Amino acid sequence: MKERVWIDRARLAAAGKGYKGFLVQATSANQRDTLEGYGFRMVDQLFVLFRSLARPLPDVDRPLWDLRLRRAREVDVSSVIEVDNRCFDTFWMMNTSALTEATMATPRSRFRVLTAGDQEQVIGYAIFGLGAGEGYLQRIAVDPEWRGRGLGTLMIADGLRWAKRWRARRVGVNTQQSNRSALQLYIKLGFELEPEGIAIYSWEDR
Ligand SMILES: CC(C)(COP(=O)(O)OP(=O)(O)OC[C@H]1O[C@@H](n2cnc3c(N)ncnc32)[C@H](O)[C@@H]1OP(=O)(O)O)[C@@H](O)C(=O)NCCC(=O)NCCS
């Protein structure tokens, strides 16, 4: 009954702001049952993984090409969005406000871009966050043309090193259960699967 009150409040608040629907996440079987009972539709399922920083950090070779991993600047935002939109399906694509939100989600964050050549073409990016003694890999993407050359690994190793410097105990990440390449990469780098994942549910006013 308590859940019904919260769900009705959320629906009213969304409708009051002109939204026709909203998303909510469930982290336990109980929450999933409740949301399904109220007619919410499951739209995706995520794995949750953590990587202990007590373990040695991955050893990474410097990239052979003319590549640079540097702090993201305001002028990079449109290129980052372009790379992002080539890397994720519509549901997960970011726009400028989602990108800002990702960098502000934690008290401290590290937003890096990977660039190629003199023109500094953005070919990938990563956002790590830090709060309450834990690090989070918020987002990572490598342009499809540049994948499989260790660049994802390079950016993750950089974020792990940063989180360790700030004395985080571990770094977490969520990934779509369908995203086998990201999952393989995280496991290879020492991330471990949590027993419970996250289910994303959608409410739409009919
Ligand atoms: C995940 C992603 C960042 C990896 O970038 P990358 O530069 O290709 O990664 P690396 O070259 O460092 O790592 C390669 C490793 O990833 C895994 N991998 C990469 N492509 C794979 C594929 N098609 N199938 C299975 N595993 C794959 C393997 O473990 C591989 O290790 P190996 O080279 O020793 O076999 C990139 O695929 C990407 O941008 N994907 C779309 C966005 C995304 O899914 N982001 C993560 C969301 S949580």
Image: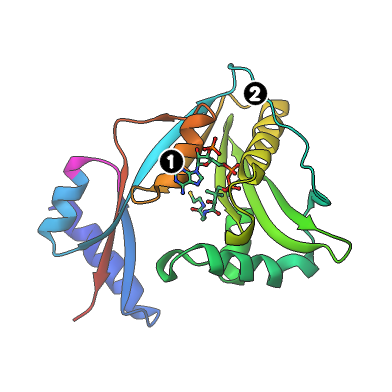
Q: Is residue 61 above or below residue 180?
A: above
Q: Is residue 137 above or below residue 96?
A: above
Residue kind at label 2, given as amino acid type: Leu
Residue kind at label 1, given as amino acid type: Leu
Q: Nearer the viewer, residue 100 or 126?
A: 126
Q: Position of residue 196 (x, y in %)?
A: 29, 35
82 left or right of 50? Answer: right
Q: Position of residue 156 (x, y in %)?
A: 63, 39
Q: Quadrant of the C terminus?
A: bottom left
Crowding at dot 2, Cα within 10 Å, few <14 / some 14-19 / many 20+, comes out as some
136 left or right of 167? Answer: left
Q: Report how far apart the C-alphas of labels 1 and 2 lie in the structure.
A: 18 Å
Q: Position of residue 135 (x, y in %)?
A: 58, 35
Q: Nearer the viewer, residue 158 or 185?
A: 185
SS for callout 1: helix
Looking at mark 1, is its residue's CB closer than 8 Å to ligand 1? yes
SS for callout 2: loop
Residues drawn in magenta: 26-30
Crowding at dot 1, Cα within 10 Å, few <14 / some 14-19 / many 20+, comes out as many
Q: Residue at x 14, y 57 (%)?
A: 36
**Which circle marks residue 57 in the picture?**
2
Rendering quarter of residue 160 = top right
Residue bearing mark 1: 183
Q: Is residue 172 above or below residue 57?
A: below
